Amino acid sequence: HRLVLRPVLRLRESSLAAGANPDAADSHVVAPGPRDEIGELIEAHNALLGRVAESKRRDRAIAEERARFLSHHEPLTGMPNRAALLEHLRQLRPGTGNAAGTVSLYLVNLLQFRVLNASLGSVRCDGLLRGFAARLKQACGPGDFVSHLGADRFAVARMNGEFAPAKAAEFAERILAGVSWGHDLGDASGGSLAVRIGIAAGVRGLDGNTLVNEAELALARTRADDVVHYEFYSPAFGEEAKSRQALVRDLERGITAGELFIVLQPKIAFLDESGVRLAGAEVLVRWRHPARGLVSPAEFIPLAESTGLIVPLGERVLADACSLIRDWLDRHGWAPRLAVNLSASQFSLRDLDLRLEAALALARITPDYLEVEVTESAAMKDVQRTAATLARMRSLGIKVSIDDFGTGYSSLAYLKRFAPDTIKIDKSFIDDIGTDRNSEAICDAILRLGQALGCRVVAEGVENEAQVAFLRRRRCDEAQGYFFGRPVPAGEFEASWVATRVAA
């Protein structure tokens, strides 16, 4: 018992303890025994526990390093991600290396990446991003920290002595030259990648999030101007951003508080050589801010689109339009068809048809009183989904109009597949009737196309007699614009168009 059984039992207890906690297996070794067969067994057992513990610690270190790598790198490109960039910027503090100096950040953005992804497919677009990342690294120097912040956004952080805008601009141009190379992009773009850069600079030790946000603000400025490819941050952008955020909060409140209201612009149908009649109206939205008064749609609509508020805003407009139709039917026994614009965000909703059906049911009106307008660019973002969505709308009896026709990715094959009820000629072509033969030729072609496909054609932005005469000669179905009437509040539209028609 003393020489054999008791040592074996100690080995058993040690093995069980080591098995329960293999990372610390070597802490459960057995005291060495006499130099006999049992002693050799104990020595081998202890050596085995040491190897197990070492292996487990090595595996854990590898796993921790792997987890750290994955948490600090984008899996698609293998480049450092936003977390790694912020950590790198934190480490660039005064007193590390060169005490003096600044750090500059270049935020590099691929424009229209979603359009490319939809048209090329995820596999080709992933290859495109990897190629772009490789080109970007080649364009930078060995000391530059290049990172991939996700999807279409990259960043380059570099150390400087005293920040020099001219040298920063030279580096930005080097990036643009390095990443702009030919690609087989199909019809998604002009065959090259559109790239914009936002540049921010600060002293070492500046909070990394602040630097990234400032570069974001500079990048946002480039999207407002097709000519500008890179932009420097200035403190004025920060004030502008604060003002923008305040307006976002006001808009969110205003949607629920009833500050937004609809206006209507008449659509006129051409009857004969001189006759016209009301064919319907387009519903537009306006915002009366309690402090600022009327806010331009050119200011708050893009704001709503970029923040996601366009969806609740669009729902509010749809509900108000349907409610207005119900009110006119109850009081006048008649109402014109109203056309409501759907944003790209609304149009991409999977349950859009159910939302439209619910709005009609709540107002107790039939689908023939409602028309939805979708821009050509929004319809082309996902052709397959667009075709399915339009088919569901048609099954509900809702009329569909393709807005801004001729300004997006026009394709006769897609137009045939979408089978819209109406196509609208963009105002930019109507404006030049009488002065530009090319614009007239485009208008004429769209009108003939609509007639061949059995679609109504509506001309937008009609403002003078010459345009009206041209459209009449080409047998355009309908027109809208200041020549026939400006957008007016619902009460004024009712008095001018609905009540007078009922009285007649």
Image (cartoon, helix red, strand yellow):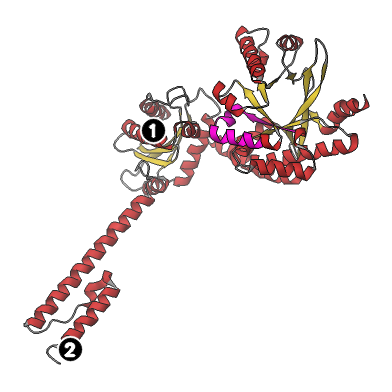
The percent coordinates of residue 261 (x first, y second) are: 77, 37
> Image check: 304 left or right of 285?
left
Quadrant containing the N terminus is bottom left
Q: Residue at x 38, y 41 (%)?
A: 147
The percent coordinates of residue 40 (x first, y second) are: 9, 78
Image: magenta residue range: 370-393
SS state under label 1: helix
Q: Residue at x 47, y 24 (%)?
A: 187
Q: For this rendering, which residue is in front, 453 or 90?
A: 453
SS state under label 2: helix
Q: Which amino acid is tagged 1? A: Leu
Query: For the view shown, which residue lies furthest in the bottom direction?
Result: 1
Q: For this rendering, which residue is in front, 398 or 51?
A: 398
Residue at image mark 1:
128
Which of the two labelled residues, at mark 1 and mark 2, occupies the earlier sequence position? 2
The percent coordinates of residue 414 (x first, y second) are: 56, 26
Q: Which mark is residue 236?
A: none
Quadrant containing the C terminus is top right
The answer to whether residue 247 is visible is: no
Rendering quarter of residue 290: top right
The answer to whether residue 216 is visible is: yes
- Residue 100 vertical placement versus 63 (above, below): above
> Image check: 81 left or right of 396?
left
- Residue 6 vertical placement versus 381 (above, below): below
The percent coordinates of residue 38 (x first, y second) are: 10, 82
Q: Residue at x 14, y 92 (%)?
A: 2
- Residue 147 vertical placement versus 499 (above, below): below
Residue 273 within the magenta-colored segment of the rendering: no
Q: Which amino acid is tagged 2? A: Arg
How many residues crowd around disc 1 within 10 Å: few (fewer than 14), some, or many (20 or more)? some
Residue at image mark 2:
6
